[in-house]
């Protein structure tokens, strides 16, 4: 790079072309819509407004290229942006937590990539959108934890057979409903009724010839088929050619993606543990997801959690093997301590209330709304066996423990999570007790770390406080009251 590493640089000139490409995609369907439906005010005005908005978005690429500068010095990353309101930022290089390089299909078409520099706070993260691919790789090496050392050794690659776990996603039904929602939303924007569209009118007249169970079954089958196909395509797009590589200096590098590629570097020194997620459909199929707990990355944020994923949906045993390799020991295989039976009673009572409360408004609706059946309120009690089973399963999943310097916690039924957290990463404890927990002698113990908060739910008070002292000795001592010992009787001398 000319001028040395500390010279001010612009974004790549192809950023302008990427911004203008926003207009290319919608222009084709907009033209088809006008030709098909006719050039009427109901069709032309909404589409013209949409194109104007996209033109404004595209112009941002031109403005960003003209006003953005950045440079890397020996100790800092400096960034300048803005036209009317100038913004200067300076980030110490030792504060960089992650370097995420992404390239969506449009970026790949023009040979550029987006570099996202994570510093531990989402609002403070820095994006360079966009730079050339070679420059993005150079920035990753310069700013990344490995400091230019290429990664090698300890490679984990996704297997083709793991694609089947994509079908066990809880998002499958929503993916199947998405096209229908988008269609009716488009008709609403254009001011059209479904009956005005010939294809929909013919489909409705055909469906009216059959009984409602046949129609409902056909619609459900169509939604699931679209959902399975969409989930499969999404999985392939996100996790294609997934590789987890560990460098000789302990840095993990993740590469994945088909149309849009992504490359992420995670330093072992900023790794605080791992989390094994087992959503209910995936757990039924014997699968799990594994992600890293990294300092400055919120594990409850979906985008950041996906960035720190150590493995795509895969067999649970494969996830346990990768976790053992990352942690240096089979920590997640440790047998956890059970929680008191009072935690089961608490969950069962919550399950009953979750069913009883909706029954009242449903009964009122069935009484006062003539078009609704009188027995509508029976839908709530009919769900009671399911809620009770989920409550019992949630109790079976509760547990906590210690292994090899790691704090372990597990909870959840629909979305079960097992967390292995380094004990030296815990910087504070929070003890929470709801009225229902106080009546049963339970509490929720929350560990605060630089990689988010992690809870031990519905543990006994004495059991939880003892465990907190065992995990991080002395951290809770200033806030606990020692048990008073009986005073000894003074001995009298003969």
Image (spheres, rainbow, N blue to C red):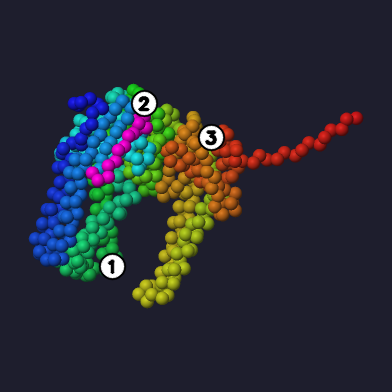
State the CA–CA distance, disc 1 to disc 3.
59 Å
364 vs 3, left or right, is: right
Segment tinted magenta in the rendering = 83-96
User: Residue 200: percent from the left, percent from the top?
Assistant: 18, 65
Q: Give the residue number, with chain letter if any, for mark 2.
A: 250
Residue 212 numbered mark, or none:
1
Q: Quadrant of the C terminus?
A: top right
Query: Which residue: 41% across, 72% down?
Result: 365
Query: Which residue: 29% across, 27% down?
Result: 73
Q: Give the residue number, with chain letter if any, for mark 3.
A: 471
Instruction: Determine the secondary structure under disc 3.
Output: helix
State the CA–CA distance, disc 2 to disc 1.
60 Å
Query: Which residue: 42% across, 30% down?
Result: 327
Can residue 113 be seen at all in this image of the molecule?
no
The front one of 2 and 298 is: 2
User: Residue 308: percent from the left, percent from the top?
Assistant: 34, 37
Can residue 93 be seen at all in this image of the molecule?
yes
């Amino acid at each position: 790079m000319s001028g040395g590493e500390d010279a001010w640089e612009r974004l790549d000139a192809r950023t302008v072309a990427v911004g203008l490409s926003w207009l290319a995609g919608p222009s084709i369907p907009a033209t088809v819509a006008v030709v098909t439906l006719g050039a009427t005010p109901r069709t032309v005005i909404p589409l013209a407004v949409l194109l104007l908005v996209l033109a404004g978005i595209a112009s941002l690429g031109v403005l960003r290229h003209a006003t953005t500068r950045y440079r890397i010095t020996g100790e800092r990353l400096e960034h300048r942006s803005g036209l009317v309101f100038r913004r200067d930022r300076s980030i110490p290089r030792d504060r960089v937590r992650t370097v995420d390089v992404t390239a969506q299909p449009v970026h790949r078409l023009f040979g550029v990539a987006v570099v996202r520099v994570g510093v531990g706070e989402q609002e403070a993260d820095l994006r360079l959108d966009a730079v050339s691919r070679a420059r993005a790789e150079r920035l990753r090496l310069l700013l990344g934890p490995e400091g230019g050392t290429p990664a090698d050794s300890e490679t984990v690659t996704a297997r083709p057979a793991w694609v089947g776990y994509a079908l066990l996603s809880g998002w499958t039904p929503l993916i199947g409903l998405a096209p229908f929602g988008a269609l009716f939303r488009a008709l609403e924007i254009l001011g059209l009724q479904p009956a005005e569209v010939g294809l929909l009118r013919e489909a409705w007249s055909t469906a009216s010839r059959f009984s409602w169970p046949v129609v409902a079954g056909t619609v459900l089958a169509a939604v699931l088929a679209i959902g399975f196909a969409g989930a499969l395509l999404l999985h392939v797009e996100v996790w294609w050619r997934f590789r987890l590589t560990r460098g000789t200096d302990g840095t993990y590098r993740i590469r994945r993606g088909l149309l849009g590629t992504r490359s992420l570097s995670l330093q072992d020194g900023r790794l605080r543990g791992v989390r094994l997620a087992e959503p209910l459909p995936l757990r039924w199929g014997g699968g799990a997801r594994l992600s890293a707990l990294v300092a400055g990355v919120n594990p409850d944020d979906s985008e950041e959690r996906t960035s720190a994923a150590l493995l795509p949906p895969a067999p649970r045993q494969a996830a346990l093997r990768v976790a053992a390799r990352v942690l240096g020991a089979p920590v997640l295989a440790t047998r956890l301590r059970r929680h008191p039976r009072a935690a089961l009673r608490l969950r069962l009572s919550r399950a009953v209330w979750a069913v009883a409360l909706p029954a009242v408004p449903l009964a009122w609706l069935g009484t006062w709304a003539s078009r609704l059946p009188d027995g509508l309120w029976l839908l709530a009690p009919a769900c009671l066996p399911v809620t009770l089973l989920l409550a019992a399963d949630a109790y079976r999943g509760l547990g906590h423990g210690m292994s090899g310097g790691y704090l372990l916690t597990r909870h959840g039924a629909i979305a079960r999570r097992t967390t292995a957290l380094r004990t030296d990463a815990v910087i504070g404890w929070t003890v929470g007790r709801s009225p229902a927990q106080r009546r049963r002698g339970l509490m929720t113990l929350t560990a605060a770390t630089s990689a988010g908060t992690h809870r031990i739910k519905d543990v006994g008070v004495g059991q939880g406080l003892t465990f907190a002292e065992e995990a991080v000795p002395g951290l809770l001592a200033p806030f606990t009251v020692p048990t008073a010992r009986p005073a000894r009787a003074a001995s009298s001398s003969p």
